Amino acid sequence: MAVNESPVASPAPGWGRRFPRDERVFLWLVAASLVGMTAVVFGWLAWGNQNVPDTYRYQTPAQYSETVAKFTDRYQAEDGLVYVPPGEDAYLAASRYTFYPGLALQANTQYRIWLSATDVLHGFSLVGGGQNINLELAPNHVTGMNLTVGDPGRYLIVCNEYCGLDHHTMKAYLTVVPAAVMEQNVVAAGAGEEVTPGVVPAGAIEISADPTGALKFDTSSLRAEAGPVTIVMENPSPLPHNVAIKGNGVDVKGKVVLKGGTSTVSADLDPGTYTFYCSVPGHEAAGMKGTLTVT
Ligand code: CUA
């Protein structure tokens, strides 16, 4: 063994001499860029105009679904969109394979949007409108995001976390509207008819979504007499669902409702075979459908 390689022998002569000038300059540059980059990170956090979430809350999926349902009931307009007046918080729930409800926001306004997942891990990626926001949404964790939307339009939202077989179909839109449109719809939503829960129209067929969250109804075959047919579906499931009828030129959909809600669909039906199903993306394909026979 050479003497210089021994851990107990003296180091090679000259080891403690000062670094040459070029090495010293290099080390000072590294130190300066380290300090500079650290300053930019903290400065950007404090003064950067960004939309990262800065608030978190703990809420179980059931609690969060209830919050979203109340918010939706309050601001949902005729067209099914939820018009959020400036200054109000918005809520969005991700569940397989949809984002609920459809939000309409006022152009060039800052909003606080709360997001959570009600079943499994999902992603939230806002790719439209010049925004680039990517969040992970986990059940039990509610994330508050500050979002300043830009000009009117439809901003695409996609799920960027693999959440199941129909993950690739999980997308939605943020609708951004001018102030005048917001005003009209908020007034309209406020003046909407009172919804009396638990009252089922006479002669309606009553069904229920699977309470455990499985993608099915409590029945897969229904019968009705020709004429006006109404199906009322209760949703005791942690996922958003609705009831819809299609076939023989008919295509009608009830409102998508969260846990505790009731979705109603009506149509004038001729004798024949129809499909009743849930129109939330992926749900029909997974088996949430049945046959409606009209005689
Ligand atoms: Cu939700 Cu992928």
Image: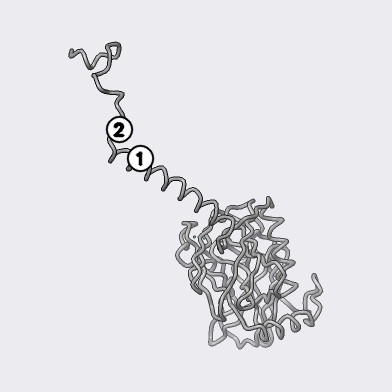
Is residue 131 shown above or below 184? above
Picture quadrant of residue 291 = bottom right
| Residue behind mark 2 | 19
Q: Tell whether label 1 touches label 2 (CB within 8 Å).
A: yes
Q: Where in the figure is residue 107, as x and y percent of width and height?
A: 61, 78
Residue 114 placement: quadrant: bottom right
Q: Is residue 117 visible?
A: no
Nearer-the-camera pick, 73 or 12? 12
Tell me the amino acid under the disc marked 2: Phe
Q: Which residue is mark 1?
A: 27
Does 229 appear above or below 121?
below
Rendered-image quadrant of the N terminus: top left
Q: Secondary structure at mark 1?
A: helix
Quarter of the figure with residue 55:
bottom right
**Mark carried by residue 147:** none
- Gap between marks 2 and 1, in whole Å? 10 Å
Q: Residue 185: where, in percent of width, then height?
A: 70, 83
Q: Please tell me which of labels 2 and 1 falls first in the chain.
A: 2
Residue at left offset 50%, top offset 72% = 156
Residue plotted at (63% across, 52% down): 141
Estimate how packed mark 1 is, as few (under 14), some (14 to 19) or many (20 or more) residues with alpha carbons within 10 Å.
few
Give coordinates of residue 212: x percent, y percent.
64, 55
85 relative position to 289: left or right? right
Of the 4 image quadrants, the one containing the C terminus is bottom right
For mark 2, does the 10 Å Cα neighbourhood hold few (<14), some (14 to 19), or many (20 or more) residues?
Answer: few
Where in the figure is residue 183, as x and y percent of width and height? 71, 83
Say above or below: 238 vs 230: above
Q: Amino acid at mark 1?
A: Leu
Q: Residue at x 48, y 69 (%)?
A: 127
